[in-house]
Image: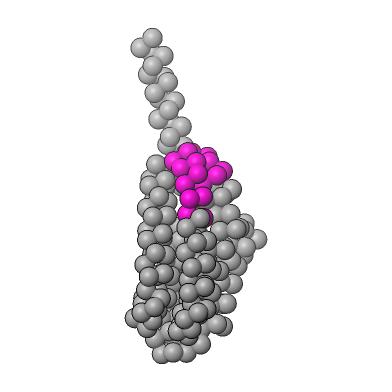
Amino acid sequence: MNKLLPYAIAAVRFDQARRLYNKIGSDEPIEGLGALICATDVGDGILMRALNADGPMRRVLDSVNDAVVLAAGFAALYQKNENARPYIKLLLAREAFVAGGYLMDLAHTRQVKKGDKFHKLASISIASFAITASHTNKPAMHITGAAAVGINGVLAADYFKGWAEPESNILLGSGVQEVPGFRGIRALLHNRGLAAGSQKA
């Protein structure tokens, strides 16, 4: 049952992304849905850890879920509010930069790493920007947009501390979990290499 939870949560968050896109497009208030999205984003990890079911797949799906929700919200806002477009472009550039580094680190270390708690500030700042931009409130939108770009820009650098270091507790925070099976394969190959070296000696 616990193994299916990450997929169930992903289905819920995909539906949230669909509803967010439709609400912004139809000029409906998104404050309630935005709060629910943030609560789900934070709560899914807490729930999985409480059930002792947190793992690499949940973390991979969490990153995919975040990207889907972000893409849905930004796509709708980009169409609706021209004044929000510069901020959206900068935030998307930041997301692409971080995602590229994340995927390269994953390919190099075969580890799925999670973010520290303060990285949720990035999500909260983007949610605040999305709410003000959906109302086309120029003064508030420019304030929250600039804040979101600044906060996300600063935190982006933190994602690359200790990049590509196996067992690193720095990159993306303190949590590290290796993709299942890779540790045993790596150890086997390492031991075989040592054995071959000793035989040649």
Identify which residue, 109 or 9, lies in the foreground: 109
Q: How many numbered marks are there?
A: 0
When the figure is inspected, residue 154 is found, relative to residue 143, above or below; the finding is above
- Toward the right, the furthest residue is 50
Q: Report the magenta residues as a range.
A: 155-171
Q: Tell me, yes or no, whether the highlighted magenta stretch contains residue 160.
A: yes
Identify which residue, 112 or 24, lies in the foreground: 24
Identify which residue, 26 or 180, lies in the foreground: 26
Split into 4 quadrants, where in the image is the N terminus? bottom right
When the figure is inspected, residue 15 is found, relative to residue 158, above or below; the finding is below
The percent position of residue 128, horizontal first and vertical second, equals 53, 74
Seen at 38% across and 55% down, the residue is: 97
The percent position of residue 56, horizontal first and vertical second, equals 49, 53
Seen at 40% across and 76% down, the residue is: 84
Identify which residue, 134 or 194, lies in the foreground: 134
Q: In this rendering, does residue 59 appear at all?
A: yes
- Classify residue 51 as left or right of residue 149: right
The percent position of residue 185, horizontal first and vertical second, equals 42, 36
- Toward the front, the furthest residue is 139
Seen at 37% across and 83% down, the residue is: 80
What colour scheme governs how the chains and residues are painted in the rendered image of this protein? one colour
When the figure is inspected, residue 183 is found, relative to residue 120, above or below; the finding is above
Seen at 57% across and 77% down, the residue is: 35
Q: Tell me, yes or no, whether the highlighted magenta stretch contains residue 52.
A: no
Split into 4 quadrants, where in the image is the C terminus? top left
